[in-house]
Structure formats: C-alpha cells, structure tokens
Image (spheres, grey):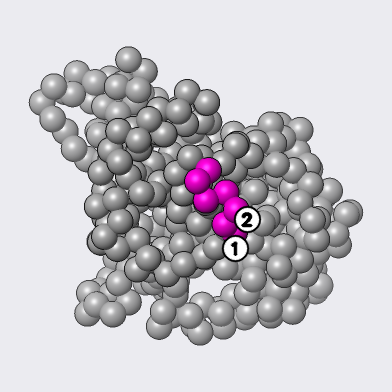
Amino acid sequence: MVESFRQKIETIIRGENPAHTLVLRNILLAFSRLYGAVVKVRAAGYRTGFLQSRKLPCPVISIGNITVGGTGKTPLTMHVAKLVQRIGYRAVVISRGYGGKAETTGGIVSDGRKMRMTAETSGDEPWMIATHLLEIKVPVLVGQNRFVVGLKAVKEFDPNVIIFDDAFQHLKLVRDINLVLLDSQKPLGNHHLLPRGPLREAPSALNRGDAFVLTRSNQTSSAAKTPLPAGVMDQIGRARPVFRTSHSPYIKCVIPGHADATAETLTADTNWLKDKKVLAFSGIAANEDFKRTVEGYGCTLCCFRGFADHYRYADSDIQSVIQAAAEAGVQLLVTTEKDYARIAHRTPLPVTLVVIGIRLDFGEDRTAFSRYLQSRLKEVTHGRTDG
C-alpha cells in the first residue's frame, strides 16, 4: 500500500498525470502552496537579516540544486574536491549525512587516510565520497548542523577550503561560492514545488547561484550549446557562467557471487555486460534513468526492481531480489555504487554483482570550469584576508 502510494506520487512528480491521479494531484498542490509560503518566509528572513547566517573562518563552496535528487551532486562534489586539492588548497568535504545514524550527532567519516564510519552510520553518499577521496587524502565529515561540523573540521584538519555537499538551501551558513546543478533534460522538473513537483524552492532562488552546472548534456551534440530554457534564464540572467557536463557511467567493481567466491573483486569495461542476462535494482532518485543506462549496455534486462531514494534494504528485500534472479535465470545482478554502499556489509550474494558508478565529464568545459574555480577561490581568499 505504502509502496503503491509512493509510486503514484513519483509518477506525478515526473510530470506523468494519468486521469486516476487527479484528486491526489489537487491534494499535493494544496500542500505545495503551503510549503512554498513557508520557504518564502524563511528566505525573506535571511535576506532581510531577521535570521542570521554564520560564517566559517575559511572559504566555503556549496554544491546544491533546487530540485530533489538525481542531478549529480555527489559526483560533482568529488570532482570539485579533487580539483581544489590539485590547485593547491587543503580541502575538507562536509555532508549532512542523510539517512545515516550520525546525521544528528555529526562526526568524521574519513580522516583522509582511513575510514572511521560505515555507510550505515555516515549515510550512503558521504561514505561513497569518503572512499573515493581517500586516494587524495581529503577528510569527509557529516552532520545536520553544518556550522558546528565546519568548526570541527577547521579544528581537526585546518583546511583552507570547505566543500559542502547539498547545501544550497542551508541559509544558516554563509557560502562564498554557490555552485548550482540543473538537469539539462528537466531543469525545473514539472515547475511545481514539493510535494506536487520536485522543486525545493521557487525558480527565483536561482539568483543566489554564482555558477551553474548543467548535467546530462551531450557535449558532442550541436544542441549542447543551446541556451537554457527561458524560465531558467529569466532567473539567473546571462552574466553568470554555465558549464555543461555529461554523466559518464562506468563499472566501479564486480563482486563475485558464492559460486566464484575465490575470484577477486575486479573492474571491467561496460562492454563486459553485452549479451549477458541481468537483473538490475536501485534505490536512487532516478531509478528510471539507471534502468535506461543498464539497457544501453546491450545486455538482456530480465527484471528491474526500483526502491525509494536512500532505501534501507532489509534482508527480505535482498532475498526477494535473489529469488527473482534465480527464477529469471540471470547471470549477473547490477546495481548503483550508492546502493552497494548500503549492502556491502552483507554476506556475498549467490550471483555476481556488478556495481555501476558515475563520473561527471565536463568535456569541452573542463578547462573553463577549472579556471573559473581557481579564479573565484583566489578572489574569495584575498577578500577574506583583506577583510
């Protein structure tokens, strides 16, 4: 019942409006208007100074969006952290830790040398970020109170840049550089606020952005350089930079099943999936996008299971997937890196598991984005020193 209701809401948010959802759409619209009023009053409070934002002692980069999930914040956070470190700064990444046990208490996921939390404690996305950034020794912390966690990061690691994952709406904190992601296919979703649509804020909030990263753009297409939709351009103006990226999926690792228990974890080219019979499952904001990605590998997708974003898999869920795989006679299970973070601690599955990761490819805009970030950090650093 709950799952069916969730699927109906997701259908409406995606812009699919079958006749039988008319009553539900109207109810959600009423809640959207109430939600929008609250968000508007809150933003006005910070804009007028009635509510105070606090400032950390080092430059802050915020990475966020105005829609819920699926735009690529996690890959961009990792990309920016690596770029900032390469430029010569000491970076730290801070995430809220949504869904993790440490979300309210806060803490260190990784000190840059070793992991200090499991995915269950930190949340799936911070754990992913931390494991990727171990190679360049960037610490990762989590906590609902970003200012308090920011001060802890300064005390523990002495960074000169802090990168906040998913902080565009965190107005309690002063941000020096606001990087805003927009999905090139649907930058404003269905143009409705939550829960009728995917918007966290009205499009006018885009005015707070300093630069915009347009994801899921095909850099080789002649359409790649076409302007953003008028509704977006009206809000951000034409002076602020827009960088276009593509999602580049890759096989992060292959986890052998029981039958191949002696085999080592390996990586492989995505062509490796061609002509294989697979069952795919995911619990992310864009399950349908992941399904299309798997189908694009030329494999035979015998079954697909979609779960809610940040879904906590119970043993019964895993057993259901295993049973469906056995009934379909599949050769492989396929899931996302984010989902694997939530099930990696479990006993190896009886079927080999392929884990798909996502990189953000700036293509032609790679150099321009690097120069922009370097220039802005220089300005911010000098501005704070002068201040």
Q: Which of 301 and 185 is in front in this view?
A: 301
379 vs 194: above or below: below
Q: Position of residue 141 (x, y in %)?
A: 73, 49
- Name the disc covering residue 78, or none: 1
The three-letter amino acid code for the residue at tag 1 is Met
x and y percentages locating residue 81 in the rendered image: 65, 66
x, y percent for residue 386: 80, 74
Question: Which residue corresponds to the image point at 84% horizontal and 48% vertical from the top-left?
Answer: 152
> In the rendered image, which quarter contains the C terminus?
bottom right
Taking the image as shown, residue 263 lies to the left or right of residue 141, namely left
Q: What is the crowding at mark 2: few (fewer than 14 residues within 10 Å), some, or many (at least 20)?
A: many
Is 260 inside the magenta-drawn segment?
yes
Amino acid at pointer 2: Ile
Q: Is residue 337 magenta?
A: no
Q: For this rendering, which residue is in front, 329 or 284?
A: 329
Image marks 1 and 2: residues in contact by CB distance under 8 Å: yes
Residue 384 showing in the rendered view: no
What residue range appears in magenta? Answer: 258-264
Name the residue that disc number 2 marks: 129
Q: Residue at x 79, y 47 (%)?
A: 116
Height in image: 194 above or below 27?
Answer: below
Image height of 263 relative to 387, above or below: above
Label 2: state its secondary structure.
helix
Q: Residue at x 24, y 77 (%)?
A: 221
At numbered mark 1, what does the secondary structure look like: helix, strand or loop?
Answer: helix
Rendered image: mark on residue 333: none
> Dividing the picture into quarters, in which one does residue 273 lie?
bottom left
Residue 316 shows up from this direction:
yes
Left or right relative to 368: residue 10: left
First in sequence, mark 1 or 2: give its number.
Answer: 1
